[in-house]
Amino acid sequence: MKKDTIGDPMSRVDGRLKVTGGATYSGEYKVAGLTYGVLVPATITAGTITAIDTKAAERAPGVLKVITSFNALKLPGYQPTAEKPVKGLKLFNDDKVYFNGQPIALVVADTFERATYAATLVKATYQTAPFETDFHKNLDKSIVPQGGRYKDYVRGEADAYKNAPVKVEQQYLLPSEMHNPMELHVTTAFWDGDKVTIYTKSQGVKGSQRSFAAAFGIPLENVQINSRFVGGAFGSSLRTWPHEIATAQAAKMLGKPVKLTLTREQMFTLVGYRPLTIQKIGLGATPDGKLVGITHESYSQSAVYEEFTENSVNVSRFLYASPNANTRYKIVPLNVGVPAPMRGPGEATGSFALESALDELSYLLKMDPIQLRLNNYADMDPERNLPWSSKYLKECYQRGAEKIGWANRKSEPATNKDGDWLVGYGIGCGAFGAYRSASQAKLTLTPDGKINIKSATSDIGPGTATAMVLIAADVLNMPAEKITFELGNSAFPMAPTQGGSATVSSVGSAVHDVCLAFKNKMLLLAGKNQNSDEQLDYAAVLKAANLPLLEITQESKGDETAQKYSMYSFSSHFAQVYVHPLTGMIKVKKVVAVVDAGKIVNLKTASSQMIGGAVGGIGMAMTEEAVMDDRFGKLANGNFADYHVPVQADIPQIDAIFIDKPDPIINPIGTKGIGEISLIGVAAAIANAVYNATGKRIRELPITPDKLI
Amino acid sequence: MNQFQYSRPADASVAIKTLSKDQNAYFLAGGTNLIDMMKMGLVSPQKLVDINNLPLKTVSEIPGGLRIGALVSNTNLAEHPLIKQKYPLLSLAINAGASPQLRNMATLGGNMMQRTRCPYFFDLTMPCNKRVPGSGCSALGGYNRMHAIFGASDKCIAVNPSDMNVAMVALDATVHISGAKGSRTMKFADFHRLPGDHPELDNNLKKGELITAVDLPEPRFSKNVHYVKIRDRASYAFALVSAAVALEIENDTIKEARLAMGGVAHKPWRLTAVEMFLKGKPANEAVFKQAAQLVSNGAKAYEYNKFKLKMAPNAVLQGLKVASGLASA
């Protein structure tokens, strides 16, 4: 009988390489004649560069080139006349400064240390211009982003909550949060004629390939992107950043390979962040806890030179069955670097506000927060008026409540004590779209009976290759040890960028389909019936057919059936917290994450991913906050000592529970994705638990001790 | 490149001589602060005098107390059996600071010498009177959540970041200093300065002087002690406020009390008035609450650190309760 391999807990196929230092990350390729680039940051926040004195830097030992807007090679894609002009900041293309820390020069030297020193010798003079970094001061200058996607949404009556018998009307603030993966952003580039090879930290090698080709005005096939191992990204490598292009630009100008590694401090200004956001929520309900109206407005920080948008209000349109709902989304352009999607982008921000407000409503109604959610359970998608492809959120509530010990929760805040400590319980829910994009995979069978599969996808940490090997092993009914999977190479068959929790859904489907196609091809070669369950000795079939090897490439994408359903992953997070009433110190004692994400491919890596997301959520709730000094237009805590990510001692036991029921619609594997959902809802669960413990409602994250004394 | 000379003398007098001669020479011990500052361009020494070969790494009993060599690592000090047994407050305070890796490298003398963590001191592009005298204090009208509520001046509102220093002041330690003109001693409480008109000076060490040891007096606070550190995360964060509490309790009466705070001033802040209030009173919660009410007397807060006016007394109250056994840590 065929064993179901999918779902088995399996260690990472590249785990040994990673923990023994055998995995080669983008900054570790030893290219002959490598030179080192270091960026020089602008020390003003807005204005024009009038001159740059590079003489001292150029005279410094080992310096090969100092690139500025005054001498840089003009890039075709940066010019307005370009067929596909590059969006966003164009480094060294003009003399404009839009934000503090924007690179104004790139120093290239024979060693990193010499380039670092020479960078301190570059002196710019500026014509400064007035600048705005104060989000709150500029809130009244918020704008609707371009394009039609961000029009006001109204279902039924707008602001219906205002006339409801019971209502909550509150404002929630999320400060800017930095992605800051452990691995610094790093790019190595070298040219051979008009062909360029790039090693870079990328979540999508095909996307990187398109960006470099567009900037340099060269065909796609002239750009080779390699990004085999990525030491975390969280969304900060979804796009190609201007300094990556500048690395290739320097390599071209010099005729030498150039490597550019951002400093940790530059990671706070040049590679995006989750934007500072103020949200206004109005909730109206009947006295028996039926929602009458939801109003959700969101105002987010963006950059003056490029708009950044995300889906912070969308969750309020579909998560609960309110007859009336309206949302508004606006951005506030400032003299800051452009934000970037950060794990659970938008939805995590929106869920914090909506799920906090819902908690507030539950106390007004004197109703258990889970009961309030059950009272307003959406049996179908109220936004699109479509059935869900699958939804097991009720089961999530039930299993999470059991695991966290919800029965021990006191409905009256600040009445549950353990010694001096106040104890509280909270719930926060999340949803994230389950997506599937077209993707390809190429399978190769070699005479030794081994299978290799290639696809131009990425692994920023979830264990992509491991999941793909499991899917292939399952379809082929072969031991996983005989299957290898390769990724992170733009020459491989097309795959989408790793984002939006869709890699297993998209690339996994391609792997699934190429394995099925391969199986049938083998059955055909062996003279057997198509789709037969008979297990063949593939090496023997290959030999009998007198073939040196066999290659199949298959594309896989969803069909129009998907249009008839609304597809989401759902989660409910539970937290138990202890708060000390004198010191305000908070201990998160336990987190339970219950997820309806369809079929789980690898229980082990999926659990790791859930735990990582919960840690991110704890940081969002309790520690992370980038602080802007608006007098200078510069961050006051842009370093790892002052910007606090949680440490191990902040992290409690985290239990990940999967409903693990396949989604019948989205893809042949039945998997919906967990990357984002692991974080969405965590911050609200903790904030709600803190309220339950203390009776203090913290609407401005992070929840630090000063807010609780 | 910033070139510098490096030497590693085995004799203190040679080290002191080198430093006295050269304006831009620094002693190097654990390097956990100095090397960071060199990398960030805050200091560019021409000479680094590595003092790790000097014989200053022992903890020894002396008549009436204990002598700790200036090069004893923070870890070795915190874990030393005599410290844990006779001066547990010091152990608690040291282990509340930094991370194990940093404590392994950092030394007693280096900990005393560490600079403030004021963000404006570390950012070369922003005015800071401590870094560039006369340039102005960016923290006064800036992001001053971590800053002082006691003893600040209009030139500087930075705080001393150390946890160890707070316990040393509470324990009435004495500092041994050697210089070109001989040796001297100083009360630990007098070692660090208030900013006044010269925030560029963190302490009263003169150019070329070397901390050689710190003496602890006869142990009398080995039982009823506690170190409260309130911070933004459970480890590897500087104190919002901290409180070192040492009580000598006999028959439920407070015979002697020592209180000092961290994260509130340019130096470890001894609460002498509160100590005097407690002396001779019963060790109960009502007394502790009255004592805590005295803590913020004379305090002055700024835009982002007003919470410290309440957090400081709360920390002291919690410290008193735990030290006296009325509450658990």
Image (cartoon, rainbow, N blue to C red):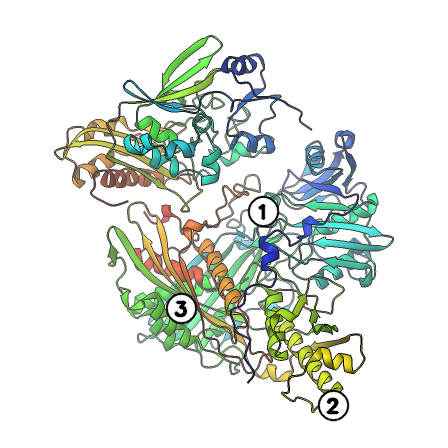
Identify the element where label 1 is drawn. Answer: helix
Q: Which residue is mark 3?
A: A283
- Left or right? Give the position of A83 relative to A593: right
Which percent across, then down, holds residue A63?
A: 77, 35
Dot in front, 1 or 3: 1
The residue nearer to you, when weighing A474 against A82, is A474
**Sequence order check: which comes first, mark 1 or mark 3?**
1
The residue nearer to you, when weighing A281 against B198, is B198
* Residue drawn 49% across the image and 79% down it: A661
Identify the element where label 3 is drawn. Answer: strand
Identify the element where label 2 is drawn. Answer: loop
Q: Quadrant of residue A639?
A: top right
* Residue drawn 45% across the image and 14% down it: B178
**Marks 3, 2 in one chain:** yes
Which percent across, then down, holds residue B9?
A: 55, 18
Query: Dot 2, how many residues are within 10 Å of its Cα: few (below 14), some (14-19), or many (20+)?
Result: few
* Residue drawn 69% across the image and 78% down it: A514
Q: Which residue is mark 2?
A: A527
Query: Do the CB atoms of the residues marked 1 and 3 lie less than 8 Å apart?
Result: no
Q: Residue type at mark 3? A: Leu
- Left or right? Give the position of B240 relative to A538: left
**Separation (CA) of disc 2 from disc 1:** 61 Å
Query: Dot 1, how many residues are within 10 Å of its Cα: few (below 14), some (14-19), or many (20+)?
Result: many
Q: Residue type at mark 1? A: Phe
Q: Which residue is mark 1?
A: A268
Q: Is residue A164 visible?
A: no
**Separation (CA) of disc 1 from disc 3:** 36 Å
**Sequence order check: which comes first, mark 2 or mark 1?**
1
Query: Do the CB atoms of the residues marked 3 and 2 lie less than 8 Å apart?
Result: no
* Residue drawn 56% across the image and 33% down it: B36
The residue at the far left in this view is B251
